[in-house]
Amino acid sequence: MSTFKDLQLLSDAAYYDRCNYVNYNVDNVLKQTDKIKNGIYYAKRGSEEVPLFKVLLTNQCNNDCAYCTNCRAHNYQRARLSPDALARIYMDFYNKNSVEGLFLSSGIIKDADTTMEEMIEAVHILRNKYSYKGYVHLKIIPGTSKDHIKHAMQLADRVSINLEAATKDGMSDLSSTKNYDRDILKRLDWISNLHRRDHNLASSGHTTQIIVGANEETDEDILKQVYKLSNKYDTLYNYFSSFKALDGTPLENHEQPDIRRTGRLYQAEYLFTQYNYKLDDLILDDDGFLDLNEDPKYVAALENMDLYPIDVNCAKFKELIRVPGIGLKSARRITHMQKEGKKITSLRQLQELGANINKCKIFVKTGKSYQSTLI
């Protein structure tokens, strides 16, 4: 098989690893599709598109992950690049200004350490033979030794290890070859501790990913783990990948989740990391799921209408950011006006400060304006 065909296979096989800008707007999540062309993945960074060379070293794999196109049970064409070939191909793209960084993952060639050694070798060649100083995101293979993880973090700007599931039982439903506690959580703990001790190791941080809808895990299961990830393991991003049933995999007939579920999970996680929400602050149904139709911040506020309306002219910052339609920036502007002794007297004035008055109007008073109903 030609190198070009190998590259196309390995680029396609890397599709489901997330490394994009996290967009917390559900409407945008519904519209968002990963853009890949000729092996180049266009990651979002705000409004920018950043071209990355996103590829697997090999799509051969000894694991039996039921959701994965590369699982050993899937009968499809396999390919493999040597570390030297991968480095050479990448530098060709880079020198032509076609890409700005490398995202490298892999199937399991023999075992975790053998695979990780080859991935590290590819980046080592880039850094030393080609004097490449640019961005590298390196995937950590579950079960990899601590020494290999440290070496990977010395070479890469960012590393990640995928949880895939939020619970031990959830992983058991998806794979018999991965030990959730030993192969994944223990390695994530090593990554976190190494980075805390030396911020030059994977200086751009570390991330993880959970597949949504591939097993029986609820939103509550996922959010419990996500809360722990940010607080215990210092993950920079916790990506959610909506399960897709792929032909030829053991889960090819499994029902796919509503894409809005992923969007709501991102919004809930954002409330944890930016708005100081706890899991108990979110409203879940009796089965442990978020409302698909409404922003979790809005649902939580409706459930606590006894706290509203609040007067924006005297409310504290921590109270303001709990109001739907008032974000961090608009809350800061409001509290700045309070400190200056200025009054907000209308919803229009609140809108000029950045608030979404259609969302916040039933939850606030501005001295003169308060809408007491949802209509």
Image: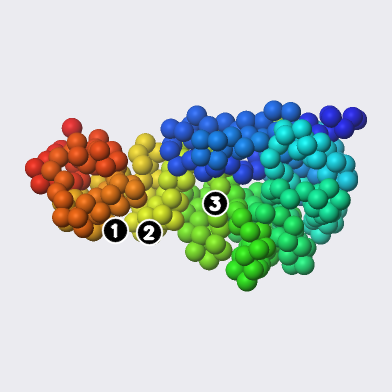
Residue 5 numbered mark, or none: none
- Local packing at callout 1 (Cα closer than 10 Å; few below 14, some 14-19, many 20+) is few
Q: Residue at x 65, y 54 (%)?
A: 158
Mark 2: give few (<14), some (14-19) or many (20+) Cα within 10 Å.
Answer: few
| Side of 29 relative to 176 (left or right) | left
- Please name the residue that numbered disc 3 is placed on: 238
The image shows residue 300 at horizontal and vertical percentages of 30, 49
| Residue 77, placed above or below residue 320 | above
Q: CA distance from mark 3 to mark 1?
A: 24 Å
Q: Position of residue 8 (x, y in %)?
A: 78, 31
Q: Which residue is mark 2?
A: 276
Name the secondary structure under disc 1: helix
Which of the two discs, 2 and 3, labels the residue nearer the N terminus? Answer: 3
Residues at discs 2 and 1 in contact (Cβ within 8 Å): yes
Give the amino acid type for the residue marked by disc 2 in the picture.
Answer: Asn
Between 31 and 125, the one nearer to me in the picture: 125
Foreground of the two, 32 or 128: 128
Q: Residue furthest left?
A: 368
- Quarter of the image with the C terminus is top left
Tag 1: amino acid: Lys
Query: Mark 3: which amino acid?
Result: Asn
Q: Nearer the viewer, residue 336 or 174?
A: 336
Q: Residue at x 79, y 40 (%)?
A: 90
C-alpha gap between disc 2 and disc 1? 9 Å
329, 5: nearer the viewer = 329
